[in-house]
Image: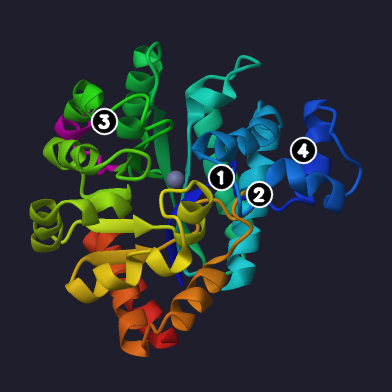
Amino acid sequence: MIDLHLHLDGSLPPELFFKLAAMEGVGLPAGDVDGLLPYLTAPRDCKSLNEFLEKFALPVSCLQSEETLFEAARGLAKELGREGLVYAEVRFAPQLHRQKGLTQRQAIQAVIRGLEKGREGTSLKTGLILCCMRGRDNREENLETAAQAAALLGAGVCGLDLAGAEALYPTRDFEELFCKARKENIPFTIHAGEADGPDSIRAALSFGARRIGHGVRVTEDKALLEEVIRKQVTLEMCVTSNLQTKAVREGREHPALWLLRQGAAVTINTDDMTVCKTTISEELKWLRSMGMTREEERKLWENALKGAFLPEEEKEALGREVRLRL
Ligand SMILES: [Zn+2]
């Protein structure tokens, strides 16, 4: 199994918070996992993307030092290895971890070290995607994230992303940032077509995005859908997350399987294992319940392999491993 779209802060094992909060000197609102879960997990009847995003406040407050970022990345990689993933691209936004004076570089390197440590003894491989954040007054921080991605590409970092409130800060406003990423040959994906419509996806493609985070709203525009299929743009789809943020109203309306059958390069991911209370196995189980065949499941992994931000030779080795397990 492969997960290409997985946020560090939204995917931490809940029991890890007791350790992280103690290390960071943060008070927790509850003393046991059951009491803590409502603060970390979005309900299925979550009202909006905003209510969903509130669940990141506590994790981010617990991850403001190299020690806690290391522990968090280590804990997550361990969990992914235990679940049997062979490859995961974990992402986080280094600029959100500077409240106590860390530089973006220090935050990134702590996460890289944690991922390496956590996957020891498992067959998991990992890559790290750095998220820039949608906003109005963080241009410098985003440029710094892109500069760090360029500097650390192939040394733990595998790509760049844009995350945050898509409907408030449209994708087209980030052209300068991705123009720079393209010049530096940094592979990138952009969250698009989740809270905003086809124009957001179109802007991301015009910048040169090889992958789109979510992209569910591609179905609203026939010409765009044809382009996405023709160019085999990887769609990083996250079903449970889309239901919680109301990007899709009901499970049976989710277009993942339909898009796969139309020939789109669909992949299935978790987005946030803890906020969404899901795993890759759970996401697959749901798709099977909707009629996904074994052949279609194989296609998901082929798409994930093709879309992975990895050098070709590493992709081939990973492909052999994935096929062995099918
Ligand atoms: Zn995401």
Q: Does the rendering let one see residue 123?
A: no
Q: CA distance from mark 2 to mark 4?
A: 10 Å
Q: CA distance from mark 1 to mark 3?
A: 23 Å
- Residue with the mark numbered 2: 12
- Is 115 contained in the magenta span? no
The numbered dot on residue 8 is: 1
Of the numbered discs 3 and 4, the one sitting upstream in the chain is 4
Q: Which residue is mark 3?
A: 171
Q: Nearer the viewer, mark 1 or mark 3?
A: 3
Work out whether 278 lies above or below 134.
below
Viewer-nearest of discs 2 and 4 = 2
Query: Which numbered disc, 1 or 4, marks the residue that appears first in the sequence?
Result: 1
Question: Which of marks 3 and 1 precedes in the sequence?
Answer: 1
What amino acid type should be assigned to the residue bearing mark 4? Leu
Which quadrant would residue 129 be assigned to in this image? top left
The range drawn in magenta is 181-189
Q: Nearer the viewer, mark 3 or mark 2?
A: 3
Q: Residues within 10 Å of mark 2 (few under 14, many from 20)?
A: many
Q: Is mark 2 within 8 Å of ligand 1?
A: no
Check if mark 1's residue and mark 3's residue have beta carbons within 8 Å: no
Q: How many numbered dots are placed on residues in this image?
A: 4
Q: Who is closer to the viewer here, 156 or 202?
A: 202
Give the distance between the C-alpha atoms of the residues marked 3 and 2, in whole angstroms: 28 Å
Position of residue 10 in the picture relative to residue 2 (left or right): right
Residue type marked 3: Thr
Residue 311 visible to the viewer: yes
**CB under 8 Å between discs 2 and 4:** yes
Q: Is 140 on the left-hand or right-hand side of 18?
A: left
